[in-house]
Image: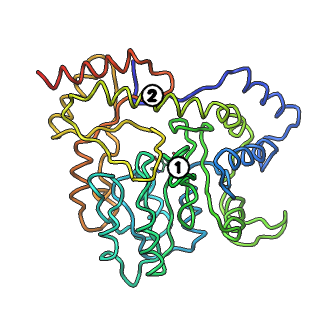
Amino acid sequence: MINVTKPFLPPLEKYQEYVSGIWKRNWVTNHGPLVSELELQLKSYLEVPHLLYLSNGTLAIQVAIKALELHDEIITTPFSYVATTSSIVWEGCTPVFVDIDPQTLNIDPSKIESAITSKTTGILATHVFGNPCDVEAIGAIAKKHGLKVIYDAAHCFGTTYQGRSIFHYGDISTSSFHATKIFHTGEGGAVFTTDPKMLKVMSYLRNFGHETPTEFAMVGINAKCSELHAAMGLCVLPYMDEILKRRKELALHYDKILEGLAVHRQKIQPGAVPNHSYYPIIFRSTQALEASIAALNKFNIYPRRYFFPSLDTLNYVHSAPCPISRDIASKILCLPLYHDLSIEEADYIARLLLREQNN
Ligand SMILES: *Cc1c(COP(=O)(O)O)cnc(C)c1O
């Protein structure tokens, strides 16, 4: 069986070494030495000034919304994972969807201003499949209207824009280190900011608002990660260069062998170096998409309809419909892409897709 993704697992012995240390110290969670070490190593690997390691990418978005004190309306994209929208609603805010650019699949900045009202407090946009949003255009609009910007950068580990990590952008960027993501700690996530004051606020939010064991600075939540999770991250991080390189090879190979397939692809933002976290293809019709899925499923290959459905169709949101996002969501497929997918397996998948098209 070939699934859309497969978590990268480091050598077991290496993980066991870290676990032995945890047993020795008898320090399992609450900002232990492995969490601190992982935060340091991530800062150095990504060349970012600040980050906080959190328990998952969804809490990272919720902590960011809380830290920036967003309320009322948040402008957001309908083409993302459900956590982007559900976090807005969970925080008591209202998502206002702005349709996407059909080429980049990111929120269309030219449509943002007409969605701003007196109740708008922020913009929450996703860098879809690791492809950076038009951060200059979004930044300029936010500045003009006094709005805060959060980027859901869950797909972006290793993506750079203008030569530096995309996590630099926005008032806060968030990421996910879930097992299916390109860098992972089993479950996990992070918030990034260049503002030390924001960092301080988010560190309170992550840990119940504790100032000291008996004093509380503000309302908080538990968004801490355990030493066991940090150990996984410390084992995976040394492989990241190799993982990014391998994914690029596989993606370029797919490009070559699927040249004759009648699909279109996401346009990468100029100035960006993507991380090939996914391999999305957009079919001409839902019918062509479904026929291709069936053809692959017959041979135990399970690609994934990602993102589907378009989030403006969720039963708990009320917003203007987004026809472009709905259209793309109805035709897009992510092909299997993971570290130990072989060239032969990619060739096999491509042959099945081309055969189905020529049927
Ligand atoms: C995975 C993902 C999340 C949620 O991250 P978790 O760590 O699973 O909570 C949020 N947004 C996007 C775009 C994602 O892909």
| Residue sticking out furthest to the bottom | 118
Of mark 1 and mark 2, the one earlier in the sequence is 1
Estimate the spatial distance between the alpha carbons at disc 1 and disc 2, rounded to whole Å.
18 Å
Give the quarter of the image for residue 337: top left
| Residue sticking out furthest to the right | 24
Residue 79 in percent (x, y) is at: 34, 53
Find numbered disc 1 in the image and state the secondary structure of the residue it sits on.
Answer: strand
* 99 displayed left or right of 195: left
Decide: few, some or many residues near mark 2? Use Cα within 10 Å; few <14, some 14-19, many ≥20.
some
| Between 101 and 97, the one nearer to me in the picture | 101
* 325 displayed left or right of 28: left
Residue 334 in percent (x, y) is at: 34, 36
| Residue sticking out furthest to the left | 359
Find numbered disc 2 in the image and state the secondary structure of the residue it sits on.
Answer: helix
**Residue indicated by mark 1:** 160
**Residue indicated by mark 2:** 249
Q: Eyeballing the image, is 325 above or below 295?
A: below
The colour scheme of the drawn protein is rainbow
Residue 76 in percent (x, y) is at: 39, 64
Tell me: is circle 1 under 8 Å from ligand 1: no
* 314 displayed left or right of 248: left
Q: Eyeballing the image, is 148 above or below 337?
A: below
**Residue at (44, 18) in percent of width and height:** 342
